[in-house]
Amino acid sequence: MTRFVESTITFPYRRSLGRMLAAFMGALTEKRILGVRDGQRVLVPPMEWDPATGDPLPLDLVEVGPVGTVQSFTWVPKPSVQHPLDRPFAFAFIVLDGASTPLLHAVDAGSPSKLKVGARVAPRWRGKRVGRIDDIVCFVPGESPEVDGKDEGPASEPVTMMDYKASTTYRNPVPAAADRAIAATRTGRLVAQKCPKCGSVYGGGRGYCVLDALELGPEHEIDLAKTGTITNFVVITPVQYPGQTETEPFARVFVLVDDSHVVFGYQPLLEMPAAEVRVGLRVRAVFAPAGDDTEETGAMGGHFGSLLGWAPNGEPDVQDPDLVNRIF
Ligand SMILES: [Zn+2]
């Protein structure tokens, strides 16, 4: 059975809200919902510009709701981790009392049969509100607003910015050959596969020859040398985004393994300051102590296992201008 690796990429970012949305988000922390007057209409959420003409709208805000009427809805039977509720719910267009346009939000109704077009719904406020649309946890059937947990009151500072995390999760299959390559690193070995037809050698457990479209199995495995030469590198100065654990500049290097054409990309450089890394530097593989498992595999490929990275082995640099052409 194929093993899969699940990866999640999260992009945190911060945006400024502008005068209109700042007022809207700030009011949410006070458990108030604001719209903006646009002629005879009241737009909720408020917009900076008239959607029909593009003309800027004055900051003429008016409080609406908080109770409203469901205009239409769709039922979400299996919420994902990114949905606002962890149980089946509805996304609904809700026309709040006093508003002319519907607000899109979640309704916690239990089952689709308990929700109808025309149903009255009220907000369930979050106890700790920060000035985001999810300060309203969801709407609930009825005329009575609720607070989820202890009400911690409005924001102490004016709301001008919003933090947000965009996130995507995906799954990659891991070839059996990659698992064997990972297992080999646990005994301090680097294995590759040699195509019986063209002789090409593949590191990292690719499992097939890209030239001959030939599947490669355990019988095609060979041991690689544990020394090599740096052909390319990048020095990364870490930006302190959430989740970044590095604080100092660090190097990722490409290593051409001795007696082969195998290049391992994006490898950690160990035991040397990043500023001293150079093309032609001779290095040796460094493995985690036995039993000290490291990252098993990632989306980048399956050849890491217990291979921690590469450290200088003390030999003189290789002087070969063609080295930089070896990336893969
Ligand atoms: Zn081949």
Image (cartoon, grey):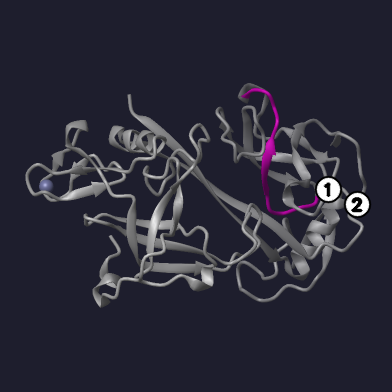
Q: Which mark is residue 33?
A: none
Q: State whether residue 24 is above or below residue 317.
A: above
What is the chief secondary structure element of the magenta stretch? Answer: loop
Return the residue nearer the eye: 317 or 244.
317
Residue stretch rendered in magenta on the structure? 98-111
Query: Quick check: 313 above or below 220?
Result: below
Q: Residue at x 64, y 27 (%)?
A: 87
Secondary structure, mark 2, is loop
46 or 194, nearer to the observer: 194
Q: Position of residue 222 (x, y in %)?
A: 22, 40
Q: Is residue 91 magenta?
A: no
Residue 215 visible (yes or no): yes
Asked if marks 1 and 2 touch (Cβ < 8 Å), the reply is: yes
Residue drawn at 84 percent across, 60 percent down = 62
Task: Confirm if mark 1 falls within 8 A of ligand 1.
Answer: no
Seen at 45% across and 52% down, the residue is 309
Which of the labelled discs sits on residue 129, or is there none? Answer: 1
Locate the N terminus and report the quarter of the image it occupies.
Answer: top left
Amino acid, disc 1: Arg
Q: Which image quarter: residue 217?
A: top left
Where does residue 94 sit, x and y in percent of width and height? 70, 43
Q: What amino acid does circle 2 point to?
A: Pro
Where in the figure is residue 243, as x and y percent of width and height? 64, 52
Residue picked out by circle 2: 154
